[in-house]
Image: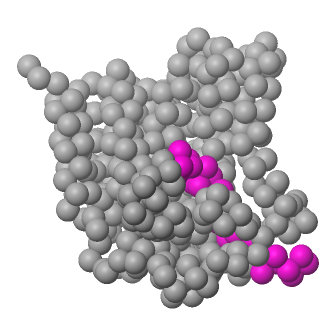
Amino acid sequence: MSSPSRIVSWFCTVLLLAMTWWYHPASQPWPTSPVLNWDASGYYLYLPAIFVHHDLRELNFRDQLLKEYAPTPSFYQAFRHEGSGNFVMKYPAGLALQELPFFLVAHALAKPLGFPADGFSPPYQLAVKLASLLVSVLSFWLVRRALLPRFGEWPTALTLLILLLGTNYIVYSGAGHAGMTHCWLFGWYAVLLLLTPSFYSRPNLAKAVGIGAVIGLMTLTRPTEILAVLLPMLWGLNPTGAALHERLAFWQRQWRLLVGALLAGGVLLAIQPLYWHYASGDWIVYSYQEQGFNWVKPHLWDGIFSFRSGWLLYSPLMLTALVGFGPLRRQQPDAFWPMLVFTVLFIYVTFAWNEWTYGGG
């Protein structure tokens, strides 16, 4: 019998490829930016600022960018820092770092293909779209690899179908808002779910460094992803004194691996304060300005159930993920508590953000 999860993985691959082909270019005339627009242009802006314009402080090319490509009606991707008078990027640097190899290929090909080597012409747009498509497809195969040995064929196959068809994943893949962080982070979570149980079964420095680097890069991409550290730190734990004592003893024996993970994550995270200091003179800058969190009154009901942008209202198949915590505790007890704690805290943090509708929702 053919593997159901393999068939579904190929179905997801073909569907993502077909949707990406159908959706590009978007129904707007070039040179209006079809991929690198709105928030996506803000995450990406580091690359043309550094490699094309060599201007990471003043961003003197911003008016020309708005005129030629109109990624947004007005320039909100950076703000003028009061102390230094320089511009500081609103969004963190993690996604730009991941897009860098694809940007460099587009930059090398732009002029030979007859396009401006300005960071926003069609080769750059296509490069970001293809990068997102590659990550979107690869992520599903990684999720299959993480789930299959633990849950079997049909649960894995149905999970992949629900993720693709029962959520807004297609919208944030190469087929939709390809310049956003979602598919990249989804892929790194899949990597983390592969590395973490492997590390605890056979701990070594390479796996520890890999876990630290993945969490560091995710946090550099979107700061709230620091919560991902809960998955490896709580993996295999249960809320008993004996389990906590055993875990502390494990880290006492393996402290070198812990240091390796912290250093790997720290090196990547250091990119952001180094940039802030270069641009503004301050090591720490709150770049989201007027936007922030309301920890006392999070928008939990609205964010989960409202017609405006309710998670479960518009993605009701995700109820299967919540119901699944019951069998998860029986089948994979090592994963139960880290998944439960992470999910509860992530939902709380997500809807404590003042802009809880998250644009397209």
Q: Is residue 341 above or below residue 273?
A: above
Corner quadrant of residue 89 = bottom right
Toward the left, the furthest residue is 1
Rendered residue at 42%/65% (across/down): 115
- The answer to whether any part of residue 178 appears in the image is no
Establish if 147 lies above or below 273. above
Q: Is residue 205 positioned above or below 117 on the image?
A: above
- Judge left or right: residue 268 versus residue 276: left
Q: Is residue 11 visible?
A: yes
Residue 80: percent from left, percent from top: 78, 81
Residue at point 62%, 62% (across, down)? 52
Question: Can you give x and y, in whole percent of width and height, for residue 297 in the image?
Answer: 63, 75
What quarter of the picture does the N terminus occupy?
Answer: top left
Is residue 84 located in the magenta-colored stretch of the structure?
Answer: yes
Q: Which residues are magenta?
A: 80-104
Residue 124 on the magenta span: no
Residue 319 locus on image (x, y percent): 33, 54
Residue placed most toward the observer, 195 or 317: 195
Quarter of the picture holding the C terminus: bottom left
